[in-house]
Amino acid sequence: MEKFPVESLRVVDFVEHVRRCPQMYFLVAQGSPELPTEVLRAVAWDALHRRDGKHGQISVEIGSDLSFTVESDQCPSADERERLLPGFSGSLLDLFDMQRWAPSAAAALSVRTVIEVWLDGHGYRQQLAGMDPTGPWEEFIAPQPFGTRTTFHLDPSFCGPGEAIAWALRPEELHREGGTCKEHPSPTRFPIHDLRAETEASFSE
């Protein structure tokens, strides 16, 4: 019987697996110029699709070539609400169940992530380095009764020079039709604000 060293049998943690095999999560490998856009697409898809197969309301803001924010009105499940109890000291990403893997996978490729969760009118905000909290979450006044808003700053050393989120994205490009979407057509439009375009316009004035 062939023997393997203990090191080869160890469990690979989620962050390491995402960074080793990003194509399993985002359809393209490290080094692909499409990787930043595919990360955004996965997070937007997750935010848009509710557990009942219907679509929620989302908005997307592109802050730079490697940073973006996705806001969603998804209502957390009862189990997710129970996790956010007094004394909770983990990552707010842990509130999402395993079906919502995209925000965690995107955080694994980020140098900084800011996540906000709104529950029953209460807001909870936390900053992460990768998937690790840099400190405890803090409360703030939530803008909506329920929802999430997450900002990802993708790791430039992982994405590589010259890679960037695509310009002039349209909703249909971030929401590829298929599966249950044929039964529940997507909204005709959700806002995509590209702050790069605004900055470029101000420089040209």
Image: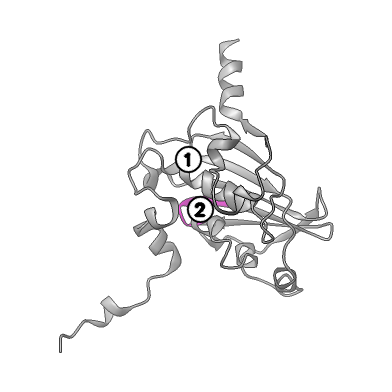
N-terminal label among 1 and 2: 1
Residue 187 % position (x, y)? 68, 40
Disc 1: which residue: 37
Judge the density around disc 1: few (<14), some (14-19), many (≥20) Cα neighbours within 10 Å. Answer: many
Examine the structure image and report whether residue 101 is included in the region drawn in magenta.
Answer: no
Q: How is the image coloured?
A: one colour
Residue at the top extreme of this rendering: 205
Identity of the amino acid at label 1?
Answer: Thr
31 with respect to 49 (left or right): left
The residue at the point 34 percent across, 49 percent down is 29
Q: Does residue 151 appear in the picture of this structure?
A: no
31 with respect to 89 (left or right): left
Residue 106's disc is: 2
Residue at the bottom extreme of this rendering: 1
Write down the quadrant of residue 14 in the picture: bottom left
* Placement of 136 over or under 186, stated as above or below: below
Spatial CA distance of label 1 from label 2 is 11 Å
Q: Which residues are magenta?
A: 107-113
The residue at the point 76 percent across, 74 percent down is 86
* Placement of 51 over or under 162, stated as above or below: below
The residue at the point 57 percent across, 36 percent down is 172
